Image (tube, rainbow, N blue to C red):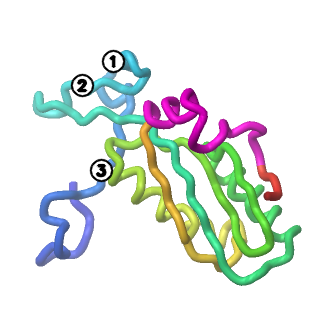
């Protein structure tokens, strides 16, 4: 099923459309995972292969006009409540960084979801009217390789909302 208006597709959309990530319940079979712990490709509807979903580490950076620290902290705590997969948020009165894991078929889907996160939760979590100024999306293997080699973002502990 494709959503959208009838007529011509937007430029560049002819080859890619966003789809939902399936679950084990979709096929009625137990969850199948490959050696990395990610879901392995499984037969999909009509006997075709379904894309494997993978875990992606997301770092979203936002920035804007100064806001009271108490309001920024409260908004990020509400965002963590609304989006329970957030690992950690760091904040100051004019910027914040949000880190979490996202399950998606590929980098394009993970990035699309990440880029919508701030705007979709802006009113419900009463987030500051900041703009997204940075986005990093890396696969699980790359994340663990960076940590093992001693560079990249430090592991997300302690989990929660913290000042810079």
The image quadrant where one finds the N terminus is bottom left
Q: CA distance from mark 1 to mark 3?
A: 20 Å
Q: Position of residue 95 (x, y in %)?
A: 70, 70
Secondary element type, mark 3: loop
Q: Identify the residue under disc 3.
A: 19
Task: State which mark lies toward you, 2 or 1.
Answer: 2
Q: Residues within 10 Å of mark 1 (few under 14, many from 20)?
A: few
- Residue 71: image quadrant is bottom right
Q: Position of residue 155 (x, y in %)?
A: 66, 36
- The residue range painted magenta reads 140-160
Q: Residues within 10 Å of mark 2 (few under 14, many from 20)?
A: some
* Image: 152 above or below 34: below
Was residue 146 drawn as part of the magenta stretch in this picture? yes
Tell me if residue 164 can be seen.
yes
Q: Identify the residue under disc 1.
A: 29
Was residue 70 drawn as part of the magenta stretch in this picture? no
Q: Identify the residue under disc 2.
A: 42
Seen at 54% across and 71% down, the residue is 133
Q: Position of residue 54 (x, y in %)?
A: 39, 35
């Amino acid at each position: 099923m494709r959503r959208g208006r009838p007529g011509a597709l937007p430029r560049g959309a002819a080859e890619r459309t966003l789809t939902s990530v399936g679950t084990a319940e979709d096929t009625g079979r137990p969850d199948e995972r490959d050696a990395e712990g990610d879901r392995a490709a499984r037969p999909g509807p009509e006997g075709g292969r379904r894309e494997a979903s993978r875990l992606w580490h997301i770092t979203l950076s936002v920035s804007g006009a100064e806001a009271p620290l108490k309001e920024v902290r409260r908004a990020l705590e509400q965002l963590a409540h609304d989006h329970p997969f957030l690992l950690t948020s760091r904040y100051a009165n004019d910027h914040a960084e949000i880190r979490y894991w996202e399950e998606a078929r590929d980098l394009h889907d993970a990035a699309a979801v990440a880029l919508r996160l701030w705007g979709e939760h802006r009113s419900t979590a009463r987030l500051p009217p900041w703009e997204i100024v940075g986005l990093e999306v890396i696969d699980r293997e790359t994340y663990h390789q960076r940590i093992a080699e001693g560079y990249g973002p430090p592991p997300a502990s302690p989990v929660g909302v913290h000042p810079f």
